[in-house]
Image (cartoon, rainbow, N blue to C red):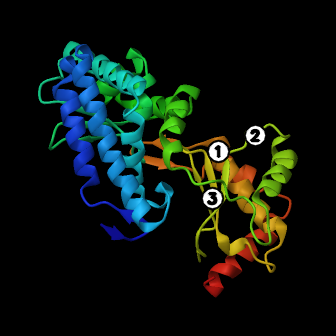
Amino acid sequence: MKRRDGLRMVGAKVVRDRFCDGLWSRLDELRHDGEQRLVLLDQLRDKSVELEKLCSDRGVGAQELETPTRQVYCWLRFLSLETNLELHLDALYRVRSLALELGCLRGLEVHLINMGSLWRYRSSQGVLCVHEGMISADRGLWRALLRGVFGGPEEAGLTQAVRTFALSESFRRVNSAMECFAEAPERSRGLRHDLMQSFLRVNERYFGGSMERPRLAWTRRVTSTCFGTYDTLRDLVTVSLTLDDDDVPPYVVDFVMYHELLHKKHGSVQRGKRRFCHTPEFRRDERLFLHFDRAEAHLQGLVSRGH
């Protein structure tokens, strides 16, 4: 256990991977034997309680866990609900059946987990890791994913297909249900500026009031170069605490809010093996901001002063 950006449980990922190994290797048994599922549910709950005790001993909430540990905790809590475990097992069954049909099952193991990316393939271990939100994907998307990973004809369009699915309501519903176990309360009101008011101003002026509101939060610490982020999977706009200052005009906060909402609007584009967020379309829209030059100059001044 260490503290870096948050509390960390050493071996949390190892625990998760052991559960994943068991879910894959005992798939038929777990799908058809209710008593074995109940045993597994108890084990999942016991591990999540360990992480809750870690937080309780430090007097903090689960949102204070370091990101990898928090992701494991949310995943354990999500699967410890019987309905979610059954959905998880059904998804593994679908992908295993397709892998057998496509001739790529031998040596393959699929882990459905909570992670920052949508999927990755550990070729040295034969493990395909896929975001838990994919439990609601249909056979067509799973087929494209398997063929793409193993060099089939869908490889070129695979990334865009998966990213499109990640914007769907079904994916967001699963991800939100998982992340809610460690979500911090929204902290939109600062000492000097209110992110909710900033969102309302920007949404009305630049999006005609049509932008669905993301979660809004200030960072917990001052930053010197990055003044905002948009987390697609969590639908969360975070603005640097640096800007919650009397010397920062409201239009600067609005510009950062607008920039992050443009990420929500435009998403990203895959070109070859690289992903681009600041596309020409993004930059074109960004310059529509009324005080673009002044806001950019103010932010650059903060960077130069090392705030």
How far separated are the C-alphas under marks 3 and 1?
12 Å
Mark identifier at residue 204: none
How far separated are the C-alphas under marks 3 and 2?
16 Å
Amino acid type at mark 1: Lys
Crowding near pointer 2: few (<14 within 10 Å), some, many (20+)?
Answer: some
Above or below residue 45? Residue 198 is below
- The mark lying in front, picked from 3 and 2, is 3
Rendered-image quadrant of the C terminus? bottom right
Q: Residue at x 78, y 54 (%)?
A: 196
| Residue 249 location, quadrant | bottom right
Mark identifier at residue 264: 1
Q: Residue at x 22, y 12 (%)?
A: 101
- The mark lying in front, picked from 3 and 1, is 3
Q: Which residue is mark 3?
A: 238
| Residue 114 location, quadrant | top left
Amino acid type at mark 3: Thr
Q: Residue at x 72, y 57 (%)?
A: 257
Q: Dots 1 and 2: beta carbons under 8 Å?
A: yes
**195 left or right of 157?**
right
The residue positioned farthest toward the bottom in the image shown: 305
Precedes in sequence: disc 1 or disc 2: 2
**29 left or right of 298?**
left
Q: Which residue is mark 2?
A: 211
Crowding near pointer 3: few (<14 within 10 Å), some, many (20+)?
Answer: many
Disc 1 is placed on an element classified as helix
Return the x and y of residue 29 as percentages of the image width and height. Answer: 18, 18
Q: Dots 3 and 2: beta carbons under 8 Å?
A: no
Precedes in sequence: disc 3 or disc 2: 2
**142 left or right of 110?**
right
Q: Is residue 252 visible?
A: yes
